[in-house]
Image (tube, helix red, strand yellow):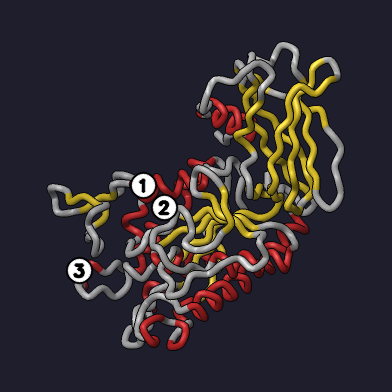
Amino acid sequence: MAMKFSQWLTGLAALLVPLRELSADEMTLALPGDYEVVQRFSAEKGSIAIAGEMGGGGERDVAVEARWRGEREGEWHPLEVHWNGGRFTTKMEAPAGGWYRVDVRAMREGQVVAERSVEHVGVGEVFVVAGQSNSANYGEEKQTTQTGRVTALDGRGWQLANDPQPGAAGSRGSFMPPLGDALEERFHVPIGFVACGVGGTSVREWLPQGVVFPNPPTVESRVVRLAGGTWESKGQLYAKLLASMKAVGPHGFRAVLWHQGESDANQQDTSRTLPGKLYREYLEKIIRESRREVGWDAPWFVAQASYHTPADEGSPDLRAAQASLWQDGVALEGPDTDALKSAYREKNGQGVHFTGAGLREHAARWVEKLAPWLEEQLKTRAVR
């Protein structure tokens, strides 16, 4: 059953632990977070989740109001609040854009008794980014956001999306800052990323716990060998993926961007190579199971990624498997990053990871796939 936004927010609030006991009429805010981007539900607007705590209980005689302030100032809105002891949850609609300052105040008998503000809140587009090293922080040159309106979530809070990206493995550069900047410049809204990629991982390691497969990946730490000689996933990366998808709530992101395949294609130990037919089967299982568990039909973009070196520029078998997911309507077409060679690859063109120029071109290739699709989504459907 799909989780409603109000259920997610109430459940999240129940997990909030106060840093200290609050005095009467003192208020704290847990949500929204500074630099948070919320996924808009239409081209024009979105809902900002608000959660906090009021000292002295609060619910018997306190009303909660909120407003957003940007280039134009919104009015104070009385909010319908769910109370649980002194904790409260609610939401406020705001126009697409930002940064907004969000002000929240508690009222008693027409008088303000407490007020708190969050300086940077955006209503825009959010993407979950998953896969292996080229989806994460392994690029040769760290990237930074040039617009200042691209942010990233690490599971605890939001920050400007300057590399390395929180939540993803590695300590170097990624394609996310230039991708976010390009989307911000095209759509004029803040962009948020929830990254969870892990370097050197096979699609087999991203499977749900207990899924069995015939041959192991090159790295065996996230899989288990069974008595009959087959293998199964421990499910650790699948759990990480689900946590990233759920972190922003129901319908809280626009799409998953999947960039992975190098660790399944053309392995030096050929017994570790995954046939394209099985790659297609396993990635489809991840996509369908994750949609079921988050409770909505989240779009997935799947890139073509199987490149290793100039001597091994890709696997036709794996590329065909990735393309079959778009052709059959399971996923949407991501960029062909196997086409990025020579000057776009590290170690003077001999490596698998991207140079600074390669990261920026990687981002540009994602924009080519995402932007036309997103323009159509904004015309035809709401994210709910």
Q: Is residue 281 visible in this depiction of the protein?
A: no
Say above or below: 98 vs 202: above
Q: Nearer the viewer, residue 46 or 56?
A: 56
Where is residue 137? Give x, y as percent: 43, 65
**What secondary structure is found at the residue carrying circle 1?**
loop
Q: Is residue 122 visible in this depiction of the protein?
A: yes
Residue 271, which numbered label? Answer: 3
Q: CA distance from mark 1 to mark 2?
A: 9 Å
**What secondary structure is found at the residue carrying circle 2?**
helix
Picture residue at 39% right of the left edge, 86% below the top: 349
Q: Which residue is mark 1?
A: 208
Q: Which residue is mark 2?
A: 285
**What secondary structure is found at the residue carrying circle 3?**
helix
Picture residue at 33% right of the left edge, 61% below the top: 201
What's the residue type where badge 3 is placed? Ser
Where is residue 330? Give x, y as percent: 52, 58
What's the residue type where badge 2 is placed? Lys
Say above or below: 334 vs 167: below
Q: CA distance from mark 3 to mark 2?
A: 22 Å
Q: CA distance from mark 3 to mark 1?
A: 22 Å
Residue 278, which numbered label? Answer: none
Res 14 → quadrant: top right
